[in-house]
Image (cartoon, rainbow, N blue to C red):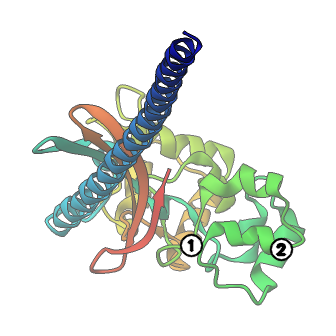
């Protein structure tokens, strides 16, 4: 009788042990399954992001090719704010890109302009201009390199960064230069206002189809005289800039502001600088 009880309890113990072991196995497998599914999901998301990144870069490269062809076939001898800032869009299968152009020669070239021009930029001043023009770091390859100079603080750079460039030949496009750049060139406030009003056209809004255009440097004075009267000093200031080769009406270096999309969803934004006769990529920055 005792033997039968012992056998029965052993069988119950064995069954209980098997049940416990089975539960542990199931728990372990569940944990492993959850872990594997999480790893797999992470890998899938990573692969998707990598695919989107590669696709975005291909779309940005397509935008560069599109811009090169456009610039090559541009027959106008001038570049205007309205012409450049018009948004270009191209659908490419499931993707698309949009871009606008920013004229790098609407800015002050810190590698070529005279010291007095740099001194008139916001916050730069005489000491900053002297440091920029005398440092062995010049010519600069990026405007951010100015931060390596003791005389240039981050605040000074921030105040003027949108008015400076390192690309081009040092000429400023009178059709696209902002007022602060024209002031840095030494033009008085009234002349700067006249130039801007002329460019805005009848609707008093710059960047529209009726904008006034300076088609050649030789016609700048004639166009402004026909628009309004100029003082002798104002005419002399313009003639001086033209004779020094600091004014132009067109530009070679361009900055592409590119946005890429996939199935209508934004992927990435880029700033891509093209310069030289072949519109070579000089800077590629993902924002």
Q: Quick one: 265 or 30, which is closer to the camera?
A: 30
In the rendered image, residue 261, in percent from the top left (x then y), is placed at 28, 40
Disc number at residue 166?
1
Q: Determine whether, in the image, residue 100 is placed left or right of residue 94.
A: right
When asked about the image quadrant of residue 132, the answer is bottom right
User: Could you tell me residue 99's position as x and y percent?
Assistant: 31, 47
Disc 2 target residue: 149
Q: Nearer the viewer, residue 220 or 77?
A: 77
Q: Is residue 89 visible?
A: no
Q: Residue at x 44, y 52 (%)?
A: 176
Which residue extends farthest left? 93
From this viewpoint, which residue is outermost toward the bottom? 136
Dot 1 falls on a residue whose secondary structure is loop
Residue at the (68%, 51%) spot, across then down: 188
The answer to whether residue 2 of the structure is visible from this angle is yes
Give the mark, 1 or 2, whose residue is nearer the N terminus.
2
> Within 10 angstroms of label 1, few (less than 14), some, or many (20 or more) residues?
many
Please tell me how crowded label 2 is: few (under 14), some (14-19), or many (20+) other residues with Cα within 10 Å. Answer: few
């Amino acid at each position: 009788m005792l033997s039968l009880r012992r056998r029965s309890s052993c069988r119950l113990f064995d069954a209980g042990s098997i049940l416990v072991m089975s539960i542990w196995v199931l728990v372990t497998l569940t944990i492993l399954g959850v872990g594997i599914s999480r790893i797999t999901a992470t890998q899938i998301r990573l692969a998707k992001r990598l695919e989107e990144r590669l696709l975005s870069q291909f779309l940005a490269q397509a935008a560069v090719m599109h811009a090169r062809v456009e610039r090559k076939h541009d027959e106008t001898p001038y570049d205007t704010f309205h012409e450049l800032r018009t948004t270009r869009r191209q659908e490419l299968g499931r993707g698309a890109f949009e871009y606008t152009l920013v004229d790098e020669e609407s800015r002050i070239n810190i590698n070529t302009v005279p010291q007095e021009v740099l001194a008139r930029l916001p916050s730069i001043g005489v000491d900053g201009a002297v440091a920029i023009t005398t440092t062995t770091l010049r010519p600069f390859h990026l405007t951010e390199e100015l931060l390596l100079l003791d005389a240039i603080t981050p605040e000074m750079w921030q105040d003027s960064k949108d008015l400076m460039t390192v690309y081009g030949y040092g000429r400023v496009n009178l059709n696209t230069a902002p007022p602060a750049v024209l002031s840095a060139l030494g033009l008085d406030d009234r002349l700067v206002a006249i130039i801007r009003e002329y460019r805005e056209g009848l609707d008093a809004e710059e960047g529209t189809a009726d904008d006034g255009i300076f088609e050649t440097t030789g016609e700048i004075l004639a166009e402004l005289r026909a628009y309004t009267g100029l003082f002798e000093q104002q005419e002399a200031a313009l003639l001086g800039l033209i004779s020094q080769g600091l004014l132009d009406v067109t530009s070679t270096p361009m900055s592409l502001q590119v946005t890429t999309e996939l199935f209508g969803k934004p992927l990435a934004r880029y700033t891509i600088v093209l310069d030289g006769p072949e519109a070579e990529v000089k800077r590629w920055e993902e924002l």
